[in-house]
């Protein structure tokens, strides 16, 4: 009996092993060679070919269009736009702003013309005036958006400047250097001022003179208070005056200016409230107060 079971067991084991090995087919030499050739060809392709289609085809065309638009505009306007973009925190480049400007000036008039053509209305004088007005509004919209972004960023810098100066003054009086104090403020605070301080400290670490980096800091933001602080620090270093004393004086002045701005806004509040009161609140009060009397008068005269 054992002489029969042993050969059968060995035969079943061999069959099982052969079946398992045949199910895991190894790639042939030709297949491995083809895979290697495909990977080598992909590695030899230039980066421009592997980039997305928009970056390879669409964006170069748009850049060329932006360059032609920049060539048509005066250099003073381009410098002004670039300065505004810098003060706004560089939400986009100058080319992007020019493309946005062109698209905004042409998109809305194109929609209106398309609506007139679809509706079958004639392009009379009123339609032409509407198209011209929409072109003006579309051209002004990016500039208004950019100015609003600059204003909000400058207001954020002005609001955070007094507290930042207090922290710088405390750090300097505690024994830190000016660069270390500015670095402490940049790491402990958030917002546009911290971003600008980080950029200034990076420029100083790369070898730029502190005086030039600080002056560039004031010019980038366009905030008068920050420019005053920067000029005071530069003059203190040139004249050998104690930086801590100058920082203490500047910090006191910043707090005084902040209180004065708050008082100014408080004085402006009643004037700003006149128009909402006259246009919205007073008519509602008149309706609520005089409405029942008017109804009674109407009933009296109608019954008589």
Image (cartoon, rainbow, N blue to C red):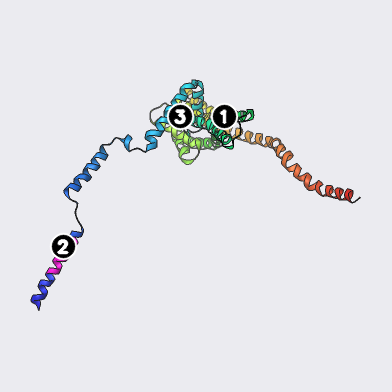
As drawn, which residue projects farthest toward the front?
120
Residue 210 appears in the figure: no
As drawn, which residue projects farthest toward the right?
304
The residue located at (46%, 32%) in the rendering is 178
Q: Nearer the viewer, mark 1 or mark 3?
A: 1
The residue located at (87%, 48%) in the rendering is 297
Q: Secondary structure at mark 2?
A: helix
Position of 276 compared to 87: left or right?
right
Residue 12 forms part of the magenta stretch: yes
Q: Position of residue 140 (x, y in %)?
A: 57, 30
User: Which portion, as a residue range, is magenta?
Assistant: 11-21
Observer-nearest of 284 and 62: 62
Count residues near mark 1 (Cα–Cα under 10 Å), then give few for <14, some for 14-19, many for 20+: many
Evaluate if marks 1 and 3 touch, with contact meaning CB atoms under 8 Å apart.
Answer: no
Q: Secondary structure at mark 3?
A: helix
Residue 95's disc is 3
Q: Secondary structure at mark 1?
A: helix
Observer-nearest of 64 and 116: 116
Q: Main secondary structure of the magenta part?
A: helix
Whole-number angstrom distance, CA of label 1 to CA of label 2: 79 Å
Residue 18's disc is 2
Residue 214 forms part of the magenta stretch: no
Residue 45 appears in the figure: yes
* Residue denoted by label 1: 135
**The N terminus appears in which quarter of the rendering?**
bottom left
Name the N-terminal-most of marks 1 and 2. 2
Whole-number angstrom distance, CA of label 2 to CA of label 3: 67 Å
Q: Position of residue 33 (x, y in %)?
A: 19, 45
The residue located at (37%, 34%) in the rendering is 56
Whole-number angstrom distance, CA of label 1 to CA of label 3: 20 Å
Evaluate if marks 1 and 2 touch, with contact meaning CB atoms under 8 Å apart.
Answer: no
């Amino acid at each position: 009996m054992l002489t029969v079971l042993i050969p059968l067991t060995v035969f079943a084991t061999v069959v099982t092993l052969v079946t398992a090995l045949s199910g895991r087919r190894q790639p042939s030499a030709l297949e491995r060679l083809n895979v290697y050739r495909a990977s080598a060809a992909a590695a030899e392709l230039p980066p421009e070919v592997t980039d997305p289609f928009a970056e390879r085809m669409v964006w170069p065309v748009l850049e060329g269009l932006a360059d032609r638009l920049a060539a048509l505009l005066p250099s003073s306007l381009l410098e002004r736009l670039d300065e505004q973009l810098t003060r706004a925190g560089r939400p986009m480049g100058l080319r992007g702003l020019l493309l946005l400007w062109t698209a905004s000036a042409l998109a809305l008039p194109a929609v209106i013309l398309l609506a007139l053509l679809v509706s079958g209305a004639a392009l009379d004088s009123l339609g032409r005036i509407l198209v011209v007005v929409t072109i003006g509004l579309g051209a002004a919209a990016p500039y208004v958006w950019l100015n609003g972004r600059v204003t909000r960023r400058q207001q954020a810098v002005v609001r955070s400047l007094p507290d930042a100066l207090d922290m710088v003054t405390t750090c300097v009086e505690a024994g830190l250097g000016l660069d270390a104090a500015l670095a402490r403020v940049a790491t402990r605070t958030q917002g546009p001022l911290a971003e600008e301080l980080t950029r200034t400290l990076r420029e100083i670490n790369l070898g730029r003179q502190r005086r030039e980096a600080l002056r560039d800091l004031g010019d980038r933001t366009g905030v008068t208070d920050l420019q005053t602080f920067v000029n005071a620090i530069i003059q203190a270093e040139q004249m050998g005056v104690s930086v801590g004393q100058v920082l203490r004086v500047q910090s006191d002045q910043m707090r005084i200016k902040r209180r004065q701005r708050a008082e100014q806004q408080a004085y402006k509040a009643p004037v700003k409230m006149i128009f909402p009161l006259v246009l919205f609140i007073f008519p509602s009060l008149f309706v609520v107060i005089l409405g029942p009397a008017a109804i009674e008068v109407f009933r009296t005269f109608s019954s008589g």
